[in-house]
Amino acid sequence: MEPVPSLYRLIRLCRLFLPLAIVLVVVVFELSLEPYQGQPLAFWLRMGFYGLVGPLVTWMTLEWIAQQVQERERVQQALEVANQRLRAIGSILKQASTADNLEQALASVAQEVAGALGMEVALTLEGVRATSPGFKVGLGQIHEVPLPHLKGKLEVSLLRPLSSEEQSFLEVLAAEVAGALESVRARSRDLLTLYEVDQALRAEANLGRLLERLMDRILAWAGASGGGVLLLDEENFLQPQVLRDLELPPHAFMPEQRWKEALEKPVFVRDNLLAVPLREQTPIGLLLVQGQAENLRQRLPFLRFLAAQVTLAVRNAQAYLRAEELALTEERNRIAREIHDGIAQALAFMALKLDLSERLLLTNPERAKEELRQVKETLRSQIREVRHSIFALRPIDLERYGFLESVRRYATAFAEQAGFRVRLSLPEKIELSQASELVFFRVLQEALTNAAKHGRPGLVQVKLTPLGERGGLLEISDNGKGFRADASAVAMGGFGLTQMRERVEARGGRLEVESAEGKGTTIRAELPF
């Protein structure tokens, strides 16, 4: 488009040259009348020239100015329309960028498009439809424009035919709407993937199953054809943990060349195979994603974020495994102490009593019977203790019965075996991760064991309360002997208050113990999801 000259400059040029041109024309005209001086013809020629040419020149000058002003107004109006359309497109992009979901984005964009066009519109994308308030099917002609690269369309209710300029703007507007909605879809996919990854982190403590679930979500989000997770072992070899449709050896290998470089920054170790480092202060492994290289480059920022989530998951799972190993070691030590302090000493006591009874059998039969009675009572007591220990050590199949049913079965069976009543208050449903379920179950086991062993209650109440997103609260109360607060670690026995609290706090929860002599004991454990 050629630049339009300034109207001000044109008028200034006319102001300079038009007077000179008029003077020149007048001089030439007067000179041409010299032969007719004094004749009537000269008079009438002057009247005709000055009466007609002057107004004609004035009219032509003003007409030219009017045309120039009209052209400027047309350009100004077109510029204002273009600015309005640009503002409308900017508002559409802003509304789409601030929408929380696709439905909200369609509704807000439909309102903006209707305002920009001055017509009622409807937007449809992936089965979701949004209309401006006045849009009605059958009211006027419906003009449809497909949304480029999307399975959707923009419908406009026409009250008059569209001009070619309006048709062109409508196509441009449809392209901008499609781009804005595609951004909303991509953002929704990212948020959904992040939510699913977070749910997987919360719901699974087993490292292998956790990585499998994370890999499913990452590959689905990236549209990848394959992927995997490799972790560094103690000798700094890359050990495959999860492999999906990748041509990689199933055994550990030393990272060299590009593999070694990938431990520091994202690198394509092969054509279309991107390796993203899993690292905190030091690398712990690699996240592998296989797909179109350009697609993976565009998704790299979010892939790095997902790799950080995988790193956190691996660290948490490894810490949980170490905590479990420590708990097993402590449990073995506890059993050894109980055998030494309980059963072993009881057996030694019974052996001494039997020896004494044997010596008194002939000389003092009554005393011998009394000693044998004590042996029998001690033996029965130890049999109960052994049964308690065996019951507490039985494997738990939470996956088979579910957490709530397992709690119900265990508490009922334990109460029958220990000789006290149990009152259960359990919800119909509670949302907890497997790790939190297991910790709650261990607290229940230890609390019931300690109550039977030390409290001698007649009634134990078990209450589990869902706390929504905060997790759950387990409360175990008994009407047993209780204990002094300063003697809690000894009185609780076995697992011990300190170890029980450490296990709960390792899951981000808290443990409270209330007890008084002769008033029973209450244990409250609160755990997050």
Image (cartoon, helix red, strand yellow):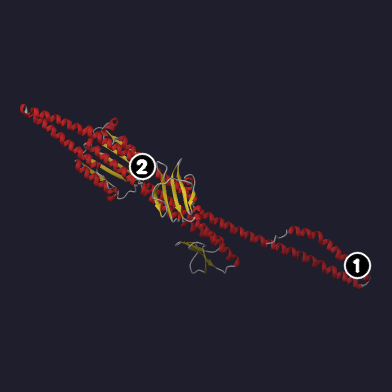
Which structural element holds mark 2?
Answer: helix
Mark 2 and mark 1 in contact (Cβ < 8 Å)?
A: no
In the figure, is residue 291 to the left or right of 359?
A: right
Q: Residues within 10 Å of mark 2 (few under 14, many from 20)?
A: some
Which structural element holds mark 1?
Answer: helix
Distance CA(mark 1)–CA(mark 2): 115 Å
Q: Amino acid at mark 2?
A: Tyr
Residue 501, by quadrant, is top left
In the figure, is residue 97 to the left or right of 210?
A: right
Image coordinates for residue 447, horizontal then vertical, percent: 27, 39
Residue that numbered label 1 is attached to? 31
Q: Nearer the viewer, mark 1 or mark 2?
A: 2
Q: Is residue 371 above or below residue 400?
A: above
First in sequence: mark 1 vs mark 2: 1
Q: Residue furthest top?
A: 363
Q: Amino acid at mark 1?
A: Leu
Image coordinates for residue 172, horizontal then vertical, percent: 57, 62
- The residue located at (7%, 29%) in the rendering is 361
User: Which quarter shows the N terminus?
Assistant: bottom right
Residue 113, by quadrant, is bottom right
- The residue located at (41%, 41%) in the rendering is 235
Q: Which mark is residue 320?
A: 2
Image coordinates for residue 439, horizontal then vertical, percent: 32, 42
Q: How many marks are shown on the rendered structure?
A: 2
- The residue located at (74%, 63%) in the rendering is 65
- The residue located at (54%, 59%) in the rendering is 176
Residue 481 appears in the figure = no
In the figure, is residue 76 to the left or right of 505?
A: right
